[in-house]
Image (spheres, rainbow, N blue to C red):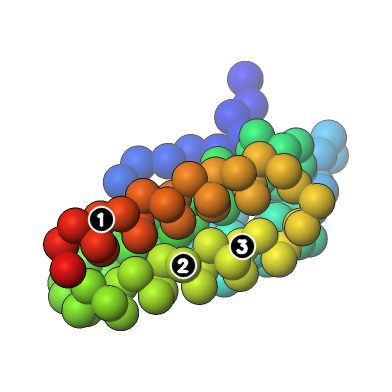
């Protein structure tokens, strides 16, 4: 059976839905930019999948940058900017906007608590 995505900490692969049913190709998504491009180009379809891929692309990029140790302010800015960017890939994708809003609230509360 086909899986729309394959995720493990630090690694995300998506099934390129543009190629179905003639070809099955999983593409690596290692950054927010690649997540945005996959959403924008409709390699990922369906509101829940768009939100999941958007959020996981951010998680993968953060995981892979974990040794950089940015300041809390820089980390907050990066996350908030990334979420806004991801929403812009498909502005009508309500689930992505809702997930981004929840993550934004969480990040802002954590930053306020830590700051």
Within the image, what quadrant is residue 5 found in?
A: top right
In the picture of the structure, the residue carrying the numbered disc 1 is 110
Q: Residue at x 81, y 39 (%)?
A: 20
Question: In the image, residue 37 lies at what x, y percent?
Answer: 68, 66
Q: Secondary structure at mark 3?
A: helix
Q: Residue at x 65, y 34 (%)?
A: 48
CA distance for labels 1 and 2 = 13 Å
Question: In the image, residue 82 lies at what x, y percent?
Answer: 51, 68
- Looking at marks 3 and 2 on the same chain, the residue that comes earlier in the sequence is marked by 2
Left or right of 54, for residue 59 = left
Q: Residue at x 80, y 51 (%)?
A: 92
Report if the CB atoms under discs 1 and 2 are less than 8 Å apart. Answer: no
| On screen, residue 70 above or below 89 | below
In the rendered image, which quarter contains the N terminus?
A: top right
Left or right of 108, for residue 81 = right
CA distance for labels 3 and 2 = 10 Å
CA distance for labels 1 and 3 = 21 Å
| On screen, residue 19 above or below 5 | below
Q: Is residue 104 visible?
A: yes
Left or right of 107, for residue 81 = right
In the picture of the structure, the residue carrying the numbered disc 3 is 86
In the picture of the structure, the residue carrying the numbered disc 2 is 80
């Amino acid at each position: 059976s086909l899986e729309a995505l394959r995720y493990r900490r630090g690694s995300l692969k998506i099934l390129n839905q543009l190629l179905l049913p003639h070809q099955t190709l999983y593409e690596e998504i290692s950054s927010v930019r690649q997540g945005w491009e996959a959403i924008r180009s409709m390699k990922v379809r369906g509101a829940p999948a768009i939100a999941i891929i958007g959020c996981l692309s951010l998680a993968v990029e953060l995981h892979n940058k974990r040794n950089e140790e940015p300041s809390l302010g820089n980390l907050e800015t990066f996350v908030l900017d990334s979420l806004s960017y991801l929403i812009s890939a498909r502005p009508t994708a309500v689930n992505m906007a809702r997930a981004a809003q929840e993550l934004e609230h969480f990040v802002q509360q954590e930053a306020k608590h830590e700051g």
